Image (cartoon, rainbow, N blue to C red):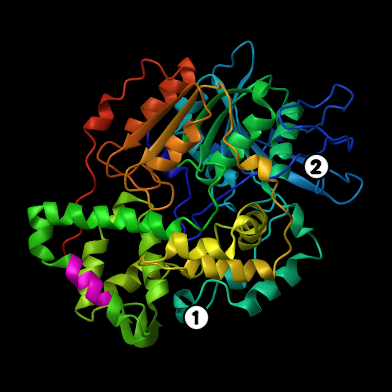
């Protein structure tokens, strides 16, 4: 079995996250309180699952589409189809079991990695169906893609410009509003979507396997439907009070400082890149003003002149730290840039294939985060969280400006409190995670009386590219089988080694 890292796609610059809102309404329009289950009077939603249209090895997969209200308070209005893919259990138990895979972003489609569970990840469906539902606004669930913001097919310089130019945000909103009420693409509705799928597929309980933003969706589902959850496995935990991207600057500061210390402590890295910490600080000072750089590569016949900004430079480095492999290349990137060679940085920051379709749906990302996160950021919070950091307020300011141009709802204060539950929960976190550090997992665990936090040394946001990439999978599979955090064998974690530093 190969690692689940082959499945997860949460390594893009939009790797980011958050929150659940509100007391949702049932399909009948009757109000419920968090924790209530759907009343028996509500008809069971129906979905027909049939072999996926693709031929070949994918024929084992089952596909279906489930219509759900776009706005649960007014189900008579627009309905959207949720895209569902199920990899069936190899040995189905008498009481059907199901793993619900919840992807990150928000904006990444859960169904994109379905093939993983047919071969390398087949152990996950030894007795469980693996259920993948594209989050509303992603994949094939009324996707809110927007080419300008996703940098699809744009000039290379556009990948080095600010994240959310107002003109492009406005263009994106205008292009999507004809087919989506953008205020409805929020976590509270996504929770109801998951419950609709569970009921339609007739699972008594589900195991939640969540990554990054998916951990927020999972815990809010537990808050509302605790009796329907058997276990929670969370990778890169986002506690309810987390307000994305307010924490990005401090998260990167901590992770990158540890990376510099790792380089200083290793003889080969220290000798290859002497005085790296001082040269990093000097480089940031030089980048206070945008620099022009002529970039040459095998794909560019005459090269190209590009402008490099400090805020974008640091943000690209932050994104690279989601995986340990990317992080271990950064000392070389900083060393070269300090000598006026930005080619290693551009190899990291520019897309290897500009024609690849986007993975994160930019419209979904804005809809979820503008309501669930940015609406809770006060102007006075920005400096206290980002002041005196290398990244500064860049990400927060970009997103707050974009959200002023984007429709958003309000976030109920009550849902900022920790989710309280006795559901067995395995919370896996990378010690070098630049976006959800171990403190976030500990915070999430405060309300989970049956939780265990596992810290993976040297790992980033996705802890699957260390010396034994299947180590984490073995732990998660043992937990899935036993449904208890007691007596898990964690010894393989102590032997994990990070990838080598890229020295040349």
Marker disc for residue 300 = none
In which quarter of the view is residue 275 placed?
A: bottom left
Q: Which residues are magenta?
A: 277-283
Determine the residue positioned at 40% across, 71% down. Answer: 350
Q: How many marks?
A: 2
Tell me the quadrant of the picture where the N terminus can be found. top left
Above-or-below relation of 214 to 385: above
Q: Residues within 10 Å of mark 1 (few under 14, many from 20)?
A: few
Looking at this rendering, what residue extends furthest in the right direction? 76
Above-or-below relation of 322 to 404: above
- Coordinates of residue 351 in the picture (x, y in percent): 43, 68
400 is within the stretch colored magenta: no
Most common SS among magenta residues = helix
- Coordinates of residue 263 in the picture (x, y in percent): 17, 56
- Coordinates of residue 443 in the picture (x, y in percent): 47, 37
**SS of the residue under disc 1:** loop
Q: Which residue is mark 2?
A: 68
Above-or-below relation of 236 to 320: above
Mark in the foreground, 2 or 1: 2
Of 64 and 408, the residue lying toward us: 408
Q: Which residue is mark 1?
A: 155
Determine the residue positioned at 90% across, 24% down. Answer: 41
- Coordinates of residue 273 in the picture (x, y in percent): 13, 65
Of 69 and 242, the residue lying toward us: 242
The reply to whether residue 31 is in sight is yes
Determine the residue positioned at 59% across, 70% down. Answer: 149
In which quarter of the view is residue 120 placed?
A: top left
Tell me the quadrant of the picture where the C terminus can be found. bottom left
Above-or-below relation of 105 to 479: below
């Amino acid at each position: 079995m190969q690692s689940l890292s082959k499945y997860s796609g949460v390594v893009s610059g939009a790797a980011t996250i958050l929150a659940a809102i509100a007391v949702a309404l049932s399909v009948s329009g009757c109000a419920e309180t968090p924790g209530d289950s759907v009343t028996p009077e509500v008809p069971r939603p129906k979905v027909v699952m049939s072999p996926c249209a693709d031929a070949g090895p994918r024929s084992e997969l089952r596909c279906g589409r489930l219509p759900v209200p776009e706005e649960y308070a007014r189900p008579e209005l627009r309905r959207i189809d949720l895209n569902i893919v199920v990899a069936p259990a190899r040995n189905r138990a008498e009481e059907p079991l199901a793993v619900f895979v919840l992807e990150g972003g928000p904006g990444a489609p859960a169904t994109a990695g379905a093939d993983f569970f047919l071969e390398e990840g087949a152990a996950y469906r030894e007795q469980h169906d693996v259920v993948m539902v594209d989050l509303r606004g992603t994949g094939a669930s009324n996707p809110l893609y927007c080419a300008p913001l996703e940098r699809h097919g744009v000039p290379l310089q556009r990948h080095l410009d600010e994240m959310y130019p107002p003109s492009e945000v406005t263009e994106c909103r205008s292009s999507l509003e004809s087919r989506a009420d953008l205020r409805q693409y929020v976590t509270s509705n996504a929770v109801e979507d998951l419950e609709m799928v569970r009921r339609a597929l007739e699972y008594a309980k589900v195991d939640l396997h969540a990554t990054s933003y998916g951990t927020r969706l999972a815990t809010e589902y537990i808050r509302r439907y605790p009796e329907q959850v058997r276990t929670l496995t969370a990778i890169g935990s986002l506690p309810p009070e987390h307000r994305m991207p307010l924490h990005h600057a401090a998260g990167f500061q901590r992770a990158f400082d540890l990376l510099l210390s790792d380089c200083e402590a290793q003889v080969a890295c220290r000798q290859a890149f002497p005085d790296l910490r001082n040269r990093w600080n000097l480089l940031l000072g030089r980048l206070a003003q945008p620099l022009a750089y002529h970039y040459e590569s095998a794909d560019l016949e005459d090269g190209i002149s590009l402008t490099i900004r400090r805020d974008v430079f640091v943000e690209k480095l932050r994104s690279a730290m989601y995986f340990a492999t990317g992080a271990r290349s950064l000392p070389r990137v900083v060393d070269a840039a300090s000598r006026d060679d930005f080619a290693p940085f551009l190899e990291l920051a520019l897309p290897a294939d500009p024609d690849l379709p986007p993975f994160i749906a930019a419209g979904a990302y804005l809809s979820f985060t503008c309501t669930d996160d940015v609406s809770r950021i006060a102007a006075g919070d920005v400096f206290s969280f980002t002041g005196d950091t290398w990244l500064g307020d860049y990400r927060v300011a970009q997103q707050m400006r974009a959200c002023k141009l984007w429709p958003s709802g309000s976030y109920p204060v009550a849902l900022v409190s920790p989710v309280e539950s006795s559901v067995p929960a395995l919370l896996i976190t990378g010690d070098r995670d630049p976006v959800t550090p171990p403190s976030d997992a500990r915070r999430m665990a405060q309300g989970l009386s049956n939780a265990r936090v596992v810290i993976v040394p040297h790992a980033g946001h996705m802890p699957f590219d260390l010396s034994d990439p299947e180590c984490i999978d073995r732990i998660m599979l043992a937990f899935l089988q036993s449904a208890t955090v007691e007596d898990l064998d964690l010894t393989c974690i102590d032997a994990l080694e990070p990838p080598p530093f890229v020295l040349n």
